[in-house]
Image: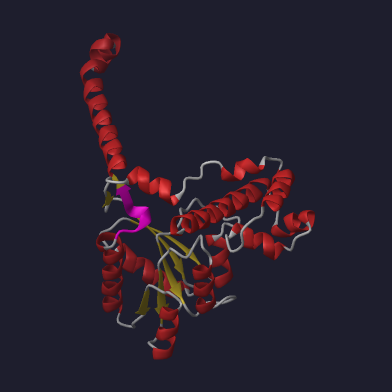
Amino acid sequence: MDNLADDLKELDVFIGKRLREKRHKLGFTLAQVGENLGISHQQIQKYEQAQSRVSAGVLYQLGQFYGTSPHYFYQGFTSLHQRSEKKKGNAVFHNPAKALNILLVEDDPADELLMRRALDASNHKINVFCVHDGAQTIDFLRYKQDLDVDFPRPDLILLNLNIPKRDGFNVLKEIKRDRLLQGIPVIILTNGISIEEMVNVYQNYASGYVCKTFDRALFQANIVTLVNYWSSVVVLPGMAQDQDEMIEEEEEEDFLLETEDSSQDIFFPSLPSFQRASQR
């Protein structure tokens, strides 16, 4: 029964993601979809966030509205049990060469600059994208906002509590309620340590609580330590690699090296006119 429950949860998340991607591709808003189906836009959002299971009838209606078959929303789904069977006996390795993708939530330009400099001090490869308020954070994570940037799903979120529109507590709770986002570690950034605040964020599943000390050298050292921990000590899903993937990458690298070597051997002999011209 546990396997079935896990598979159903995975399926809800998968269908929700397909629904959201299809809606975005066609350019519909939640309100437009809800109005057409006679359902509230909040309910459509719950379907997309896998907070509510989509019935077969509603999925058929959504397929009709989007001009596709209901089977479209199931295509490509592999259950947790099937994946575990496929990977059984195949170890997963940490690949420290992969970049750590960080979403920074900071409204103060000066603090953003200090944080970027602290992150740059780390030896690990890092990609950073910054948003400046709570509403923008949720929009970015759920791909609602049309941002002109190609940034992958974050491996880690650095979240300042004191941000406008939706405060950090609200954003943290929203992330941890969303089954598509709740697996992303969230580190809270604060200007001062408060016992009540600290207990509150940990009770809402924050993965860390960091004080933005006025000592810049100490702050930078703390951020470097934090990055090293999340990039080198723990294994995050975005930085994990199974044995088959590692073998494929190694074979591809070997092939490219062999191609370079062979091209150096045959390039000039096969094009004598170019060889003579280059020797003038």
Q: Picture quarter containing residue 212? A: bottom left
Where residue 74 appears, as percent x and y from the top left, is 57, 44
Residue shown at the point (32%, 52%) measured from the top left: 240
Q: Identify which residue, 64 or 107, lies in the foreground.
A: 64
Q: Is residue 94 above or below residue 139?
A: above
Judged left or right of residue 147, residue 272 is left
Residue 263: tell me if it is visible: yes
Query: Residue at the bottom extreme?
Result: 195
Q: Looking at the image, how many numbered discs can be counted on the residues?
A: 0
Vertical order, 271 against 56 (above or below): above
232, above or below 79, in the image: below
Q: Residue at x 31, y 64 (%)?
A: 230
Q: Where in the figure is residue 138, as x and y percent of width and height?
A: 55, 66
Q: Is residue 271 magenta?
A: no
Rendered location of residue 181, percent (x, y): 49, 62
Tell me the quadrant of the picture where the C terminus can be found: top left
Question: Residue shown at 27%/43% (left/top)?
Answer: 243
State whether residue 280 appears in this view: no
For image coordinates 30% across by 40% down, the residue present is 244
Q: Please provide the residue range marked out in magenta.
A: 235-241
